[in-house]
Image: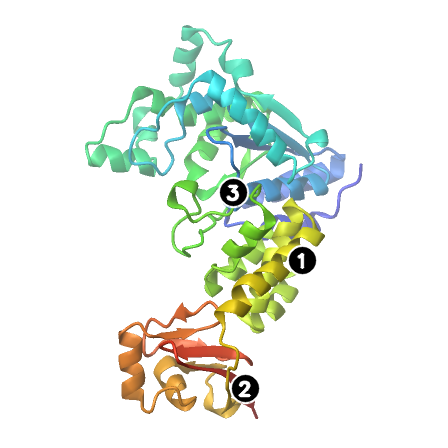
Amino acid sequence: MSFPPVEEQLAIIRRGTEKIVPEEELVEKLRKSYETNTPLRVKYGIDPTGIDLHLGHTVPMRKMRQFQQLGHQAVIIIGNYTALVGDPSGRDETRPRMTPEQVEANAQDYLAQLGKIIDLDRAEVVRNGDWFSRMTFLDVLDLCSKVTVAQLLTREDFSKRYKAEVPIYMHECLYPIMQAWDSVMVRADVELGGTEQLYSFMLARDLQRDQNQPGQVGVMTPILVGLDGVRRMGKSLGNYIGISEPPYEMMKKFMQLPDDCMRMYFELLTDLELDEVDRLLAGHPKEAKIRLAKEIITQYHNAEQADEAAARWQREIAEKSLPQDIPTVTLSRQKLTDGTMQAAFLLKATGLCSSTSEARRAIAQGGAYLGEQKERIERFDQPIRVEPGLLLWVGKKRFCRVELVD
């Protein structure tokens, strides 16, 4: 097996990565791998606490696929024992515990969905119950003796709960220790996950060194925001896109995505070159959003279904929601500043409001919008990027498209 040059590998790994800890060790591991023609062992752990994967879950999995394509060994840990504890990361209260039967049923569904993202035929798939179920109580005591309570309380979630006098149960404290011990058992060179996993990643390095193993490197990806554009994508928040949802349902959700989230989605969820992404984002937001949706729907369904979903959305939602005759207003590019104009001035310049005072009142009352999706203009001084074909609204009966002229 031959690997791409180290710098080429790094460029791929760094895309859509928020933090690599410690990065200099990853460079050294890649160099040694290249020189010895030995693949790195790249770990990703999944606790099957639910059965529907959404796009937020796919971010580290896509990174795993990149490592596979570079020639490295994917090691997938099905956390059938850690799932019995429940990951406390980011939680303000104890997670309800699951039964072993629930966990195993979920694991089967997880693997079926995971196969849409990574090559399971080339991956090692293990369950951490394979080693935790064999541990005696003395083994557990020995493992726990390697971690102090003070170390555990440096975790943000535990620290927050401790200060608020919210109970932290002993079984929850075992979770990061178990996750870290998984790295020892599979001899991980790299572990993938979100930034909230930093504590467990670093604890794994300590336990590996204690076992005379080289410490793993943590490759951490950003937390994908949901359709609200603010909070992390999550099913309980209702701001998610499931990878097993029907193509048309996915398309409708993509078209609700705030414009300023598109770059993150393109970078983390597609393989498009970033130059191409920049070109798309410089054009009309609706067209960029349709392209984004089709790229991702194709990954989890196929190109024909993605095209059909886009055409159906255009036919059933976009065309029906827009007025039949939309007047066009010309606007000189010279009036723009870096391609933008403040909202109140734009509404006056296009004739939708007779004065900036009227425009300010319309915006303050929540009656000014832009785009086919009628996104609300929030502030009178909000900079609006003016692209050819931009649709503006004031109330229900005043609207126009902007045509730029030199």
Q: Earlier in the sequence, mark 2 or mark 3?
A: 3
Q: Residues within 10 Å of mark 3 (few under 14, many from 20)?
A: some
Relative image position of residue 273 (x, y in whole percent): 66, 60
Q: Residues within 10 Å of mark 1 (few under 14, many from 20)?
A: many
Q: CA distance from mark 2 to mark 3?
A: 38 Å
Relative image position of residue 14 (x, y in whole percent): 59, 51
Q: Earlier in the sequence, mark 1 or mark 2?
A: 1
Q: Residue at x 41, y 7 (%)?
A: 137
Q: Is residue 95 above or below residue 380?
A: above
CB within 8 Å, label 2 to label 3: no
* SS class, disc 3: loop
Relative image position of residue 298 (x, y in whole percent): 66, 51
Q: Is residue 95 above or below residue 259?
A: above
Q: CA distance from mark 1 to mark 3?
A: 21 Å
Residue 54 badge: 3
- Is residue 20 visible in the rendered structure shown here? no
Q: Residue at x 65, y 65 (%)?
A: 276
* Depth check, front residue: 160 or 379: 379
Residue 403 badge: 2
* Depth check, front residue: 393 or 70: 393
Q: Quadrant of the N terminus?
A: top right
Q: Which residue is mark 1?
A: 307
* SS class, disc 1: helix
* Depth check, front residue: 32 or 356: 356
- Is residue 357 visible in the rendered structure shown here? yes
Residue type at the position of mark 3: His
CB within 8 Å, label 1 to label 3: no
